């Protein structure tokens, strides 16, 4: 049986909603950017706007975490946005085995992840007793990387992408980020309408994915950024369309290009499909990229062979 482990590291600075702003401890590298000073008072104000989801939307959180994304030129140090999922210690070994199938099939946004245990925090939120947390890379890292390169991104919606014969087909459900205080992935997972395991085992099902638009003239820079993120393991497959052309039957505005990103919570959705209880929070905060490891290492340590 998996034993409760303890730790004291505070992994992030962007708190989960409803966490007091006093829990913020902004990294030094985020205090000085582009010759602007991000003071503690400013960060407190940001989080006061963010806390409690009062009048806010998922789009607000995307924009905040995109700004807080702070990677060095080699992508080896700095802060990246992540999702947090809490599992019972008793079920975590079984969950790891299920989620490993998703990572092996490259159906998650990134193969990198981390495990946080009792006493550790993400965005000021401690892992409860009897629970263990899985941190997965959020696709908001794309927004953050583009923002630093001066490329505007219109994050349109999160949805359920239908897959048939292992080919991406169309979105069958979608929720606009601007119109929802909850992240669409949380809604779809809680509703138990995903079929990630079906895609893995039969080649047909529904996975979590998001849709974005970028200026078509930015594509050379966009592809360079995506290639660098892929080389570092921070993202897997990214689907791009033709200028002004549809992507998976989604129309794109004139002079724009569509961008489709697989959800970082697809492994968690698969665990829920298998009957495992999970509490997940998309875009929960940021952690240092040096904490992340390939999920195969987590599977070796916490899976049936290691746990």
Image (cartoon, grey):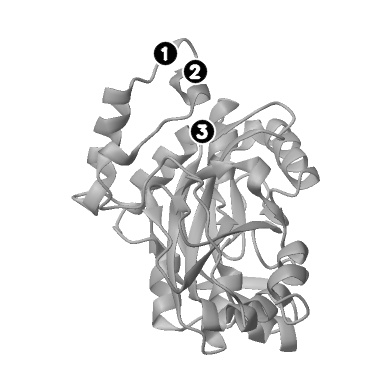
The spot of residue 283 in percent (x, y) is 45, 53
Tell whether 266 sits left or right of 174: right
Give me the disc on residue 152: 3
The quarter of the image holding the C terminus is bottom right
Q: Compared with residue 58, is residue 249 higher up or lower down, i.e. above or below? A: below
Mark 2 vs mark 3: in front: 2
The quarter of the image holding the N terminus is bottom right
Q: Please, what secondary structure does the residue beneath circle 2 have?
A: strand
According to the picture, the residue beneath numbered tag 2 turns out to be 33
> Does the residue at mark 2 contact the one at mark 1 (Cβ under 8 Å)?
yes
Indicate the quadrant where residue 232 lies. Answer: top right
Q: Residue at x 43, y 62 (%)?
A: 127
Q: Residue at x 75, y 35 (%)?
A: 224
Mark 1 or mark 3: which comes first in sequence? Answer: 1
How far separated are the C-alphas under marks 2 and 1?
6 Å
Indicate the quadrant where residue 96 lies. Answer: bottom right
According to the picture, the residue beneath numbered tag 1 turns out to be 36
Q: Residues within 10 Å of mark 3 (few under 14, many from 20)?
A: some
């Amino acid at each position: 049986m998996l034993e409760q482990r303890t730790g004291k590291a505070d992994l992030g600075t962007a708190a989960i909603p409803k966490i007091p702003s006093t829990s913020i401890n902004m990294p030094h590298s985020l205090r000085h950017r582009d010759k602007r000073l991000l003071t503690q008072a400013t960060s407190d104000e940001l989080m006061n706007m963010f806390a409690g989801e009062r009048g806010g939307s998922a789009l607000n959180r995307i924009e905040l975490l995109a700004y807080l994304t702070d990677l060095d030129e080699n992508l080896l140090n700095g802060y990246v946005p992540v999702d947090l999922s809490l599992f019972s210690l008793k079920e975590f070994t079984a969950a790891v085995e299920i989620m490993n199938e998703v990572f092996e099939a490259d159906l998650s946004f990134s193969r990198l992840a981390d495990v946080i245990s009792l006493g550790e925090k993400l965005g000021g939120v401690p892992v409860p007793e009897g629970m263990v947390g899985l941190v997965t890379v959020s696709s908001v890292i794309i927004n953050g990387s583009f923002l630093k390169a001066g490329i505007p991104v219109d994050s349109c919606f999160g949805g359920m992408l239908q897959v048939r014969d292992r080919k991406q087909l169309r979105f069958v459900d979608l929720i606009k980020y601007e119109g929802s205080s909850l992240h669409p992935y949380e809604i779809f997972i809680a509703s138990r309408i995903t079929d990630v395991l079906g895609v893995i085992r039969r080649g047909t099902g529904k996975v979590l994915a998001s849709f974005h638009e970028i200026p078509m003239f930015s594509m050379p820079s966009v592809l360079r950024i995506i290639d660098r993120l892929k080389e570092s393991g921070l993202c897997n497959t990214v689907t791009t369309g033709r200028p002004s052309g549809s992507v998976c039957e989604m129309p794109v505005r004139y002079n724009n290009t569509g961008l489709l990103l697989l959800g970082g919570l697809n492994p968690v959705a698969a665990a829920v499909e298998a009957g495992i209880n999970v509490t997940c929070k998309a875009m929960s905060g940021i952690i240092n990229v040096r904490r992340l490891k390939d999920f195969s290492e987590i599977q070796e340590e916490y899976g049936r062979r290691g746990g």
